[in-house]
Image (cartoon, rainbow, N blue to C red):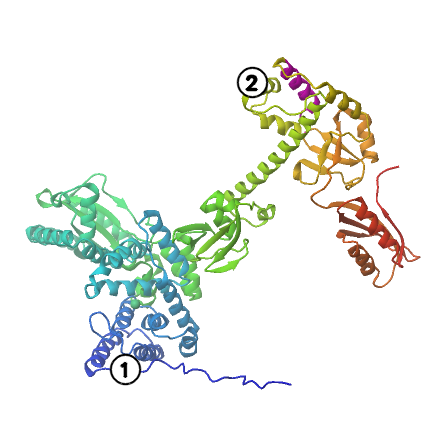
């Protein structure tokens, strides 16, 4: 009987959203702005241009009916972003991605759609942009902004993603006045704290200055108005000065037959404001508002031009900087000097070559601009003195692989970090390869110590999972949970490693202290005293005296030393008994007699009870592997804690002859809390399936197999199998051996002992 089901149930229609009617005016506006873009694309091949046009048509259709805040059709925004990218001469893939950058986010276009239509490189770029769009920066802490910037850079696998993102942000800032006023502050401060510094890091200085000035305008509109008015006024006042300097310069360079480009430069409004704010200056006190740039043909000409300038006007001491020999980290190169100009006004000068100028204004984008440059003098790599950019250009030229190029930039900027979020959007930098446990310890050692599970981006993951850029990580803790020694195998950070080690050590310390306490209490009973005195109260003075005698700082230090066998319990107990007696607590005669009498017996009533919970402080000797029910002895090695042997073990017998005072009376607790390992040897007739039969006989007795050793096969076919098994006690061991003896392939089964 079988119900027929249709394997392909009809799906709801998933076509693109229904087209809305576009007004003639809107469609004209879109076409006009695209025409402006295509006029800048003359550096593309015909095939590339066709691809860009098809991306435009697709995007135009996808955004159909959507409007910008200004009321213009939405497509004008992607076109403006692409136009900025075209100014940097980015390749066709980047321009296509720029045109499509909001399509996935806003128009139900999927990555698969884009792969099919435009290929995966373009789809990856758009996907990268969509991911960045989802990151929101919403904290005011300074170091967080730095981390956020780095995360953004690290997340973008391709530098073109960052460039398109910067173009996107630039256009949004240029049109911010159209956006609702309530959004201005957030967007402007995000731009100022995140995007402008990224532009700076990548050397896109023009974009950097523009983003700063625009942010300033929306964040501090009044101050912006005041500064810009003041600059305009000053500009008028100093017009004569500027013209005089310009004329002097032109005459000087002409006299020496040097072809240079000279132009005046004005400090950006934000940098003036920032300087006033930071150094507490009035506008009049900011002297370096004007400067000049001198662009010279070659590297050596920079120094010649500098010499000429220093002849023309007196240099201000201490203001000369050679950023050619030592370039800035973002690739910037120039000679800087300040001269005392006409009317004793200080004027700043920057001297550089065309190639340096290109890098100074556009930074990393010079990579594309440079490739496109038809001018032979620019294309000479020697002229591009910046080692940083040069190495990038070399990689770019050799492999033509923008990703490799970008990886190189990232390594330069921030070597090994991964940036992740806490659930409260705090950003944490973790070393590459760090795991969830490292993250937990980075938050707080309590979080690490009690971590039991984790959710990464809302999915449950194992604690050993490596964290990735942009992950949102939540650690689940439980009070009763503690670090697992296995974590040491995968944690990457020194902090996690040392915290786990510290915890394990303190666990061992606790174990030793508990054992020491048991041993001292037992030894004290042999002196006729029932209980250890309390640490506080009437007997506190007794402990102080005892510690003075033993030389330990604290009671627990003393107990740990006893537990580790560094100190003999009976000697400490004798001293303690004397101190107690001095303090008025006399031994109990009955107890004394009983303990003395029993001490000689095989099983002492007051021995240290072993139940298996002692962890590191008690070890079970591997020569004889005692299990509950066996007669046992405790040997207190120096500094090694207590080792429990079978009473008949030869090793123990030898030790006892040599070192008898180090043996203490131990006994099994009534209910041990775990299983114990012991060894058995099973002699079998070898053959197919023998091991399985032996294993099932052991399983029938509920015994776990820890380890199997097979001796070489003997010619007769009889073979010894040695097992380490885990049992609750001697009784269970006996029943397992009985089971084995009843298995027909088994010739012999017995426990491995170390006795005579
Ligand atoms: Mn956008």
Q: State whether residue 570 appears in this view.
A: yes
In this picture, residue 366 sits left or right of residue 220? right
Q: Residue furthest top?
A: 582
Q: In the image, residue 131 lies at what x, y percent?
A: 39, 64
Residue 541 is tagged as 2
- Which one is in front, 515 or 587? 587
**Residue at 35% across, 57% down:** 382
Tell me, yes or no, whether the highlighted magenta stretch contains residue 483.
no
In this picture, residue 536 sits left or right of residue 200? right
Up the image or down, 67 lies above or below 677; here it is below
Q: Is mark 1 on a helix, strand or loop?
A: loop
Q: In the image, residue 599 lies at what x, y percent?
A: 78, 25
- Can you tell me which quadrant of the image ligand 1 is in? bottom left
Q: Residues within 10 Å of mark 1 (few under 14, many from 20)?
A: few
**Residue at 76% across, 51% down:** 707
In this picture, residue 547 sits left or right of residue 522? left
Magenta residues span 564-581
Which residue matches tag 1?
Answer: 20
């Amino acid at each position: 009987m079988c119900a027929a089901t249709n394997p392909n149930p009809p799906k709801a229609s998933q076509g693109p959203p229904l087209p809305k009617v576009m007004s003639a005016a809107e469609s004209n506006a879109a076409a006009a702005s695209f025409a402006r873009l295509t006029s800048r694309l003359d550096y593309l091949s015909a095939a590339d241009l066709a691809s860009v046009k098809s991306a435009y048509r697709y995007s135009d259709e996808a955004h159909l009916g959507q409007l910008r805040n200004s009321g213009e059709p939405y497509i004008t925004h992607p076109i403006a972003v692409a136009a900025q990218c075209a100014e940097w001469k980015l390749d066709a893939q980047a321009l296509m991605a720029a045109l499509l950058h909001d399509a996935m986010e806003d128009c139900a276009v999927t990555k698969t759609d884009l792969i099919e239509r435009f290929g995966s490189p373009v789809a990856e770029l758009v996907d990268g942009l969509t991911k960045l769009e989802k990151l929101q920066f919403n904290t005011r802490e300074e170091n967080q902004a730095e981390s956020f910037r780095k995360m953004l850079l690290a997340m973008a696998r391709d530098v073109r993603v960052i460039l398109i993102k910067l173009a996107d942000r630039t256009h949004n800032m240029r049109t911010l006045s159209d956006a609702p006023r309530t959004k201005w502050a957030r967007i402007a401060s995000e731009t100022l704290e995140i995007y402008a510094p990224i532009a700076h890091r990548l050397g896109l200085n023009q974009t950097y200055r523009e983003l700063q000035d625009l942010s300033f305008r929306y964040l501090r509109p009044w101050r912006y108005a005041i500064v810009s008015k003041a600059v305009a006024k000053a500009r008028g006042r100093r017009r004569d000065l500027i013209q005089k300097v310009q004329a002097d310069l032109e005459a000087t360079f002409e006299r020496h037959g040097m072809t240079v480009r000279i132009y005046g430069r004005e400090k950006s409004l934000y940098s003036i404001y920032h300087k006033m704010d930071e150094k507490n200056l009035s506008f009049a006190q900011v002297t370096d508002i004007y400067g000049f740039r001198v662009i010279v043909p070659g590297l050596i000409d920079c120094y010649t031009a500098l010499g000429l300038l220093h002849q023309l006007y007196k240099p201000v001491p201490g203001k000369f900087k050679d950023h050619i020999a030592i370039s800035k980290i973002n690739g910037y190169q120039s000679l800087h000097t300040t001269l005392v100009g006409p009317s004793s006004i200080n004027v700043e000068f920057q001297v550089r070559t065309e190639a340096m100028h290109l890098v100074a204004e556009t930074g990393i984008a010079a990579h594309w601009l440079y490739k496109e440059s038809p001018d032979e003098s620019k294309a000479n790599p020697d002229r591009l003195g910046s080692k940083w950019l040069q190495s990038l250009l070399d990689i770019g030229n050799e492999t033509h692989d923008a990703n490799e190029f970008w990886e190189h930039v990232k390594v330069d900027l921030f070597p090994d970090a991964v940036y992740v979020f806490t659930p409260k959007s705090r950003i944490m930098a973790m070393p590459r390869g760090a795991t969830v446990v490292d993250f937990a310890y980075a938050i707080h050692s309590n979080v690490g110590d009690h971590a039991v599970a984790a959710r990464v981006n809302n999915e449950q993951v194992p604690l050993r999972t490596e964290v990735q850029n942009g992950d949102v990580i939540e650690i689940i803790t439980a009070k009763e949970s503690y670090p697992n020694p296995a974590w040491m195998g995968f944690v990457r950070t020194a902090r996690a490693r040392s915290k786990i080690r510290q915890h394990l050590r303190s666990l061992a310390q606790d174990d030793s202290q508990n054992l020491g306490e048991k041993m001292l209490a037992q030894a004290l009973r042999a002196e006729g005293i029932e209980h250890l005195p309390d640490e506080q109260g009437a007997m506190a003075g007794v402990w102080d005296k005892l510690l003075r005698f033993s030389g330990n700082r604290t009671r627990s230090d003393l107990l740990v030393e006893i537990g580790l066998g560094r100190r003999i319990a009976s000697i400490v107990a004798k001293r303690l008994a004397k101190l107690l007696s001095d303090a008025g607590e006399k031994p109990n005669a009955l107890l004394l007699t009983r303990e003395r009498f029993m001490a000689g017996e095989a099983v002492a009533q007051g021995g240290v009870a072993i139940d298996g919970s002692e962890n590191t402080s008690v070890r079970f000797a591997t020569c004889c592997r005692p299990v509950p029910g066996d007669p046992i002895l405790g040997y207190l090695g120096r500094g090694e804690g207590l080792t429990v042997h079978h009473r008949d073990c030869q090793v123990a017998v030898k030790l006892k002859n040599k070192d008898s005072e180090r043996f203490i009376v131990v006994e099994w607790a009534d209910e041990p809390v775990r299983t114990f390992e012991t060894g058995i040897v099973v002699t079998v007739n070898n053959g197919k399936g023998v091991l399985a039969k032996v294993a099932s006989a052991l399983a029938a007795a509920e015994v776990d197999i820890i380890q199997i050793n097979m001796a070489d096969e003997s010619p007769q076919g009889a073979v010894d199998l040695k097992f380490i098994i885990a049992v609750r006690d001697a009784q269970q061991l006996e029943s397992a051996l009985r089971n084995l003896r009843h298995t027909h392939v088994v010739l012999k089964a017995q426990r491995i002992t170390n006795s005579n």
